[in-house]
Every structure is written in C-alpha cells, then in structure tokens.
Amino acid sequence: SSSSLSHIQFPTSAAQPSTNGNGGENEITHYTHSNHPLTQLNLSQLFTCDGCKEYGAGTRFSCQHCDFQLHDFCAAAPPLLNNHPLHGQHQLVFHSKPKSGGMSWPTCDVCGKSTKGFTFRCRACNFQMHPCCAMLSTEVNFPIHPHPLRVLPPLNGAAMDCGECKKRRSKGRIYRCTVCSDYHLHALCAKPFVNGLQANGIPTPGKPTSALGTAARLASQVVIEFIGGLIEGIGEGMGEALVQNMVRGRCISRRTRVRE
C-alpha cells in the first residue's frame, strides 16, 4: 500500500508515489516490476537498485520471487517534481529508463555521475538527476559536520577540497558550511547519507572493473607467458631477435598509420 511509502518525502510539492496500492502494509506493486509484489525489508547488506542502478543498503523494496530490488525513494518516486529546490525554475518528469543517444551515459547535474536508470529530467532544458539526488535540498544537515550545509551555485566549488573525500571534483554540486565557510562537501559524498550506506557502515564501493578490461589483461598475460616460453625453447639469442623484430614491426606500422 502507499502507506509503506508515506514516510518518504522529496523536498518539493507533494505528489503520489508511482505505485499501485495492492498487498499488505509493507508490500507494494510497482509498475516497473508488475509481475510480483515488492516487500519492504531492512537489511544491512549492500545491494544495487534495479531502478536507478546505484548502490544502497538498509531499507529497500525487494521481490521475494526474484532478485529485483528498489531503493525506498526509487519506489516512492512521483511522476512529477514541482519547484524542486535544486531546479525550481522548471518541472521535472520521472523517467524509468535513461536518456538514449550518444557514445556515453548522460550525467546527473547534482552528483556528476552517470544516469543509467530511474531519472528525473527537465523538459525545458537538459537538467537531470538521480532519485537519490532528488532527496537532497539546498540546505542539508549530516552527522559528519555540526553545522548546516548550503549548496553553492553550479561550478562555484570546482576548486574546493571536500571535507569527506579530501578531493576536488569538476562535476556536480558542492555544499559549504553556513558557519565555518572553509568546510565543503560534494553532493556525491552526501549521497551515502541518503542511500543507507553510511547508516550501515558501508564505504562507497569503487568503480567496478569491466569484464572487457579484465579479459584484455588476461589475454595480454597469456601472450607474454607464451613469448617467454618461446624464448626459453628456442634459445635466448634467437628469442631476443624475435622480440626485437616484433617491436620493430610494431613501430613501423605505427609510423605508417601516422603518415596516412
């Protein structure tokens, strides 16, 4: 029922969650997974949301028949956001699939990371953000700092060190302390306080290693080991000559491509 989601409030005008009111008090039917109901669970393990494709921990809506899981705020995402503090000039529309086109994923204007699933997008301009980022506002309070933090205008915090990750980022919004103005926090580093990772003591996982990159490294290692065995088999003198010829041929080929 929608009462399972009533505690989730986006910082904007009220709207009904995009769910169907079937099932028990802690059960919903979401239109993106209409075959099975989703049950509200609170588990400390890390998971990847099948809606926004981002990490989460703690409260989630999970299918008991398959591995489908949603953040609670993704399950509660309304069809429209009006007057959102981070983009109050236009209405934002919920999309269950990412924007298509181009050679790379589009990026969120709040955290600067790729949007690969559920997204709020503006029809009037190119602004878009994750549902997790839509839970943020212009002023936030987090336990890592004793004072309220207020978001800076876009691009104004590019050269500022984040008090959480100790790094600088050229993408995404940044918050600054309203009292001690030398403390800053990336919106990206604020997300673990929304998606349950911080509450469950889970550090944000690093960028996953692609299967293609792993396969390429393994293939390179196989080739190196093969050449090494070949050198041992035919003698060091002939082996070194073979390797030198291979390198020379690669250099000639590279110069030919440059001339073309």
Image (cartoon, rainbow, N blue to C red):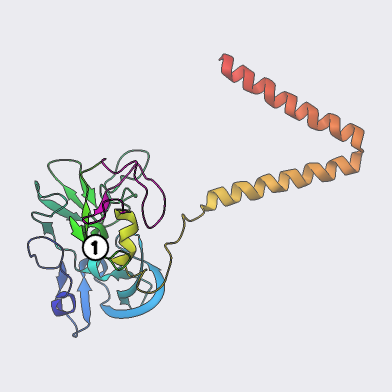
Q: Is residue 195 above or below residue 258?
A: below
- Is 22 displayed left or right of 244 in the figure? left
Q: Which residue is most to the top?
A: 259
Examine the rendering and report whether any part of residue 232 can be seen.
Answer: yes
Left or right placement of residue 124 versus residue 38 in this view: left
Counting from the top left corner in percent of width and height, residue 63 is at: 32, 76
Q: In front: 123, or 152?
A: 152
| Residue at the image position 34 percent from the left and 73 percent from the top | 199
| Quadrant, the C terminus | top right
At horizontal 24% and vertical 63% (from top left) the residue drawn is 147
Q: Which part of the image, by quadrant, shows the N terminus? A: bottom left
Identify the residue position indicated by label 1 in the image: 147
Query: Residue, x 81% and y 43% (percent of image)?
Result: 228
Of 231 and 135, which appears nearest the observer?
A: 135
Membership of 156 in magenta stretch:
yes
Question: Which residues lie in the magenta part?
Answer: 155-183
Task: Tell me: residue 97, above or below residue 260.
Answer: below
